Amino acid sequence: MTDKKRTEVDWEDLRVFLALGRHGSLSAAARALAVNHATISRRVRALEASQGEKLAERRPEGYVLTPAGTRTLAVAGDMEAAVQTLGRGGTEGSPKGVVRVNASPALAQGFLVGRLARLPTLFAGLDIDLATDLRAVSLERRKADIAIRLGRPHDGDFIARQLGRMAFGFYGTSSLCRRVEGGADPVFVGFDEENADMPEAAWLAHHYPQARVSFRTNNQFAQATAARAGAGLALLPHYIGRQESGLRLCRLAPIPTPREIWALLRRQDRKDLPIKTVLEYLARTFADEQALFEE
């Protein structure tokens, strides 16, 4: 068997591989780094040559990391974090640099954007990158520094901090709510078929199996808009329903059990000043406005 040859690693190769590992495809990695596909492929091949191991395999659904690729991605992420820390203000002084926060589209649009946008005005060197995903993102792949999730997390070596609880209710126009409260069969706005496995969608299908769902969309913020137009009742977190002037809470039971809101960060980032600053700000913000979320 030929010995695997290892040579000195080029940081640019690692940076490109980190983008591929995070995004899972050549096109997404190329967009993220503003380079072409050929550059991504060339850099990954160069890194594999320097390591003497296959790091990623191309599949129909995208690139999948090999065990060696997973180890390399972790090392590349740690190196990136170390470089960022050098320019972030260390453990003293004012925080500076970019902190990436990930949350669901509804929570981001309906609550976080307006609150997190204040941070750069409070800390001149602190920038926020708020991304939205309906499903959980990988902190291990460093797609985010802080991930906000619903339900207590059980995966990975992360630090988890509970931010509060999110309660739900049925919201609709005043006229529709009066009809339903008077005994009419409810018509609902809900999640589209692609997201039928989301907890609220599954709960609605289980408890109201025969009910008509007249309008479907992929997030609760959009569902509130459809409900305001009169399409049906939307099962919404209170923080969305209470902020929609054209909607009111409909007296319809049962309703889902409240869900816990958690913030996750990588254990090795717990002393990172910018990340700590954003996490503490989030904790204070949710605590100050918990009445918006609870029953």
Image (cartoon, grey):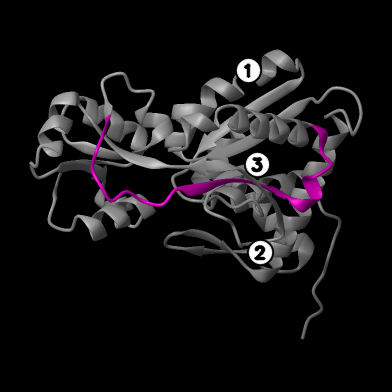
Asked whether the viewer can see residue 219, the reply is no
Residue indicated by mark 2: 55
What segment carries the magenta color?
A: 249-273
Task: Give me the disc on residue 277.
Answer: none
Would residue 82 be found to the left or right of residue 56 on screen?
A: right
Tell me the quarter of the picture where residue 125 sits.
top right
Q: Are marks 2 and 1 in contact (CB under 8 Å)?
A: no
Q: Residue 164: where, in percent of width, then height? A: 57, 41
Q: CA distance from mark 2 to mark 1?
A: 41 Å
* Residue in front for this viewpoint, 210 or 40: 210
| Residue 189 horizontal/vertical position (percent) | 22, 40
Q: Are marks 1 and 3 in contact (CB under 8 Å)?
A: no
Of labels 2 and 1, earlier in sequence is 2
For marks 1 and 3, give the CA distance: 17 Å
Rendered view: 115 above or below 150: above
Residue occupied by mark 3: 146
Query: In the rendered image, which quarter contains the C terminus?
Result: top left
Q: Identify the secondary structure beneath mark 3.
A: strand
Which amino acid, mark 3? Ile
Of callouts 1 and 3, the N-terminal one: 1
